[in-house]
Amino acid sequence: MDFIFSKRAKITFSILMLIGVIAMIFGFMNDQTDHHNRFWANIFINGFFFFAISLGALFFLALQYATEASYMVVVKRVIEGTSQFIYIGAAILIVFFLAGTFHWHHIYHWMDPEVYNPDSDHYDAIIAGKAAYLNQPFFWIRTLAYLGVWCYFAYLFRKRSLMEDELGGTKTHFKNITSAAIFLVFFAFTSSTASWDWIMSIDTHWFSTLFGWYVFSGIWVSAMIFLVLVTIYLKGKGFLPAVNKSHIHDLGKWMFAISFLWSYLWFSQFELIWYSNIPEEVTYYITRIEHFKWLFFGIFFMNFVFPMVILMARDAKRTIGYLIVVGLIIFVGHWFDVYLMVVPGTLGELHFGFMEIGMFLGFLGLFLYVVFNAFTKAPMMVKNHPYLEESKHLHI
């Protein structure tokens, strides 16, 4: 299966990673912000963004098992391969959180013990009031639980999928249905709490009851975009001969639908907070509108208008060119969405240059290298799946 991951692709992804390494070194040496906050913010933006794609793929895989869906069986290995970056992504996030724990960066203000000390000049009554939840021991327990369980299910689904190829029958399939149901219940809760812990706590004074759903929708749509693009690529190279226009159409519908879900949650969170005009809530948006106005409203335009205008028609969701163009636009838009969730609370103003572009390309190269390498570890078409023949003959 090495022909899936050609020598040219390996060189290309390696060059991207080299650009990322240079950007990291350059960024660290030239970052004049407090405790290299700009450098570490970029580590987190990219680490979380690409980790989220693999996590979203894992969620989508579990969803297919739990609903006993047949239509996506022919691209099951694409979904599985994408989920295999989750281990590298988890390691990057752990390094980032360790850096905060040892005060190598001050992205999480609540990690500074002085904010809890009433006798300190840095005492913060609001943060101190959240100490029962925002304390490092409990944070690490939650974080390791999230990452550990998610990685375990990624390993379990992959292991059983390969086992099913060898053994056949339905026993393994039904085990996966049960495991998927357990995973989805766990994920439904922890996808929100992880977003509170890792992202919302950057702006420690602020909170939103919609934030968990908002981040989840971004995770899901980013994963669907990547699955659409990589499926189109592999189909074009002849590695997915069983994939037809109906499968592409279904993937396109997911990309279209979840883009609208994200847009709905973006508007709901913004409009309700802005309309209520409660000072401790609107401060989150004031910073973003004052210093990131064009980017803040631009990502909504990118993620809502382009899918609505271009992908509304049935034929558009079956047209490769439309899917690629819209997919790439939304993909970049969601990277900027993560950027806007991190940078305003970290740096307070717009910083965008070689560091941001270089580190994005480097992480993209690493992500693609790991995912395409995972594609080589198993046949791209599953064997003995009970719904395989039904999936091959999908026609809508």
Image: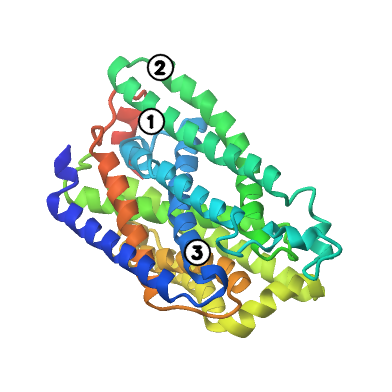
**How far apart in space, not on screen, are marks 2 and 1 (Cα)?**
16 Å
Can residue 7 be seen here?
A: yes
- In the displayed structure, 54 sits above or below 112; it is above
Q: Nearer the viewer, residue 241 or 142?
A: 142
- In the displayed structure, 348 sits above or below 325; it is below
Residue 161 lies, in percent from the top left, at 36, 27
Horizontally, is 258 left or right of 268 in the view?
Answer: left
The residue shown at (54%, 61%) is: 260
Q: Nearer the viewer, residue 219 or 9?
A: 9
Question: Which quadrant of the figure contains the N terminus?
Answer: top left
Which amino acid type corresponds to the residue marked 2 in the rendered image?
Answer: Thr
Residue mark closest to the camera, 3 vs 1: 3
The residue shown at (61%, 59%) is: 199
Q: Which residue is mark 2?
A: 170
Can residue 384 be seen here?
A: no
Q: Mark 3 or mark 1: name the one nearer the start of the chain.
A: 3
